[in-house]
Image (spheres, rainbow, N blue to C red):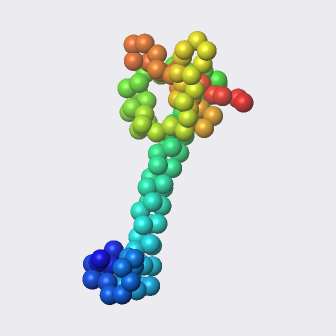
Amino acid sequence: MNCLECGEKIIGRSDKKFCNDACRNTYNNHQNKDSNNLMRNVNNKLRRNYRILKDINIDGKTKISKSKLDGLGFDFDYFTNVKVYKNGSEYKFIYDYGYKLLDDDFILIVRNQA
Ligand SMILES: [Zn+2]
């Protein structure tokens, strides 16, 4: 077994993953940093999407073309939840702002007051 951090061969118990505490700490810090970076990136995208919808949707319901939303930097891969209503229409929400794809490349933005 080799140390997960430095790759040195570990001497001693066979269930050890690191050669010493310093290597274990360094390794764990890197792991946390990676997941923190990922979370920060996702949060930034959600925040940007939210701000875009909020800026556009001034009074309750707004129609906008998908390409215009694209142009504002909206990232359609990031949302917080999906809601399917009884009539079959599906809304993707970023917190309390949601949108639905309409025909002919348009998008309907709504705000969930609940
Ligand atoms: Zn090591």
The residue at the point 57 percent across, 26 percent down is 83
The residue at the point 58 percent across, 12 percent down is 87
Q: Residue furthest front?
A: 14
Percent across and percent down for residue 75 are: 42, 37
* 37 lies left or right of 60: left
Seen in the picture, residue 16 relative to 70 is either above or below; the reply is: below
* Circle count: 0
In this rendered view, identify the residue nearer to me: 56 or 33. 33
The residue at the point 44 percent across, 18 percent down is 106
* 61 lies left or right of 75: right
The residue at the point 45 percent across, 73 percent down is 29
Percent across and percent down for residue 112 are: 66, 28
Seen in the picture, residue 98 relative to 95 is either above or below; the reply is: above
Percent across and percent down for residue 17 are: 38, 76
> Is residue 77 in view?
yes
Which quadrant of the rendered structure holds the C terminus?
top right
Q: Examine the image and state in which quarter residue 69 appears.
A: top left
Percent across and percent down for residue 1 are: 29, 77
Q: Examine the image and state in which quarter residue 95 appears.
A: top right
In this rendered view, identify the residue nearer to me: 33 or 69. 33
> Is residue 5 in view?
no
* 109 lies left or right of 31: right
